[in-house]
Image (tube, grey):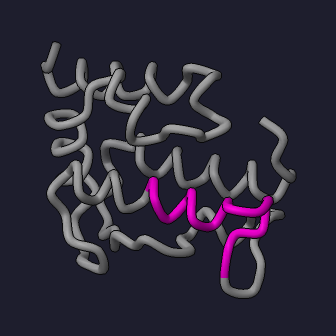
Amino acid sequence: MGYSPDFIVKMGGIVADIRNPDKEFSIQTVAAFDDACMACPHRGQTKCEANEGSNEHVLSMDGKVIAHLGLSDGETYQKNQLLKLTAEKVKPDHLDFLCEGCSWLSYGVCKEGIAELRKTFGID
């Protein structure tokens, strides 16, 4: 998907932790740089510098997801609580709005992931 090896490793670790049913941990919601951003090659000092408008785009997606889930920016939640909430409130087609303009959306893996998450929780 066009990212650096460091970013791929970092994102792989985050995804593995989230998918591990035996691993519970706290997650703080932020409409700003997060753990995944730390290894991104487009990370500037204070904002995403992938291209003009990318920082605003990322912040917009963060805000849409936080609002859609009924969360508060800056609050801390448990991983399993967020997974259940996501399964309940997000359908694969919702990503067309929540993630509009994201370069990953066209690959379909995120929609597949949401569908699988919903199945895990017995939804759909």
User: Residue 48: x, y in percent?
Assistant: 70, 69
To which quarter of the image does residue 24 belong?
Answer: bottom left
To which quarter of the image does residue 98 belong?
Answer: top left
Q: Residue furthest bottom?
A: 45
Residue 56 magenta-highlighted: yes
Q: Residue at x 23, y 57 (%)?
A: 67
Q: Residue at x 19, y 63 (%)?
A: 71
Q: Residue furthest front?
A: 52
In this picture, residue 96 sits left or right of residue 75: right
Residue 51 magenta-highlighted: yes
Residue 93 higher or lower than 10, as above or below? above
Location of the C terminus (image quadrant): top left
Please report the bounds of the magenta region as a residue range: 47-61
To which quarter of the image does residue 121 belong?
Answer: top left
Q: Nearer the viewer, residue 124 or 94?
A: 94
User: Residue 118: x, y in percent?
Assistant: 24, 24
Q: Residue at x 56, y 74 (%)?
A: 33
User: Residue 35: x, y in percent?
Assistant: 56, 69
User: Residue 51: x, y in percent?
Assistant: 79, 60
Q: Nearer the viewer, residue 28 or 89?
A: 89
Location of the N terminus (image quadrant): top right
Q: Residue furthest top?
A: 124
Give the number of callouts: 0
